[in-house]
Amino acid sequence: MSLGLQYIILFLALITFVITGNYAIHLYYKRNQKFILNELKNREYQIFNNVSLYQFSGIGFRINTADILILKNQIILFLYNTNFKGKIKQAQPTLLLFENPNDNFLNKGILLKIDNIEGTKNGISISVNNKQQILIKNYKLLIKSDNVDFEKIESIIKAKLYIN
């Protein structure tokens, strides 16, 4: 077997490994999202699909697509990485935003405490605090989209949460 053929086989094996690993991670997070939806069957919530979410931290920022579920005292964000102009949605970890740690009943996601929610000219800004991580304690989430009425989302959030 020639050296060039060995490199091609190695390259194809690595690409196959990366694709298979990403798909397995997607399936894991998708299963967690289904688990959360099953837990919410008997609860009242509002859902907004395919909303742009900008995550700001001390290090940088990320842009994701998210499905937002608004419950009493809690906001759940199902995150997705979108590729090829939205044709491929890869599930990411679920963010569980809450105002009181005692009100949280789910354990399939990243727990974040809501510090502040405010309406901006670009959308809705949510400041959260992450006590689980050492390096990044404070996040700022900006929810924005062209096809969603932010005044409606903001009024629902203010009605269900006690944060100003």
Image (cartoon, rainbow, N blue to C red):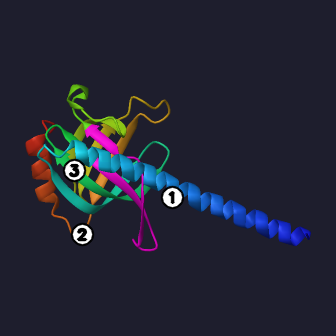
Picture disc at residue 23: 1
* Above or below for 40 versus 62: above
| Disc 1 residue crowd, few under 14, some 14–19, many 20+, Cα 10 Å | few
Which of 38 and 58 lies nearest the eye of the viewer? 38
Which of 125 and 82 lies nearest the eye of the viewer? 82
Q: Which residue is the site of mark 3?
A: 69
Q: Do we see residue 125 in this rendering?
A: yes
* Helix, strand or loop for disc 2: loop
Which of 125 and 53 lies nearest the eye of the viewer? 53
**Residue at (69% x, 60% y) in the render:** 14
Tell me where the magenta segment starts and ends, as one range: 76-97
Left or right placement of residue 121 versus residue 81 in this view: left
* Nearest to viewer (mark 2 / mark 1): 1
Are the residues flagged by discs 2 and 3 in contact, CB closer than 8 Å? no
Are the residues flagged by discs 3 and 1 in contact, CB closer than 8 Å? no
Distance from disc 2 to disc 3, alpha carbons, whole Å, reads: 18 Å
- The amino acid pointed to by label 1 is Tyr
Q: Main secondary structure of the magenta part?
A: strand
Q: Earlier in the sequence, mark 2 or mark 3?
A: 3
**Residue at (28% x, 36% y) in the render:** 106
Left or right placement of residue 122 versus residue 13 in this view: left
Left or right placement of residue 13 versus residue 111 in this view: right
* Above or below for 72 versus 26: above
Residue 108 x, y percent position in the rendering:
35, 39
* Helix, strand or loop for disc 3: strand
Left or right placement of residue 69 versus residue 84 in this view: left
Q: Which residue is the site of mark 2?
A: 146
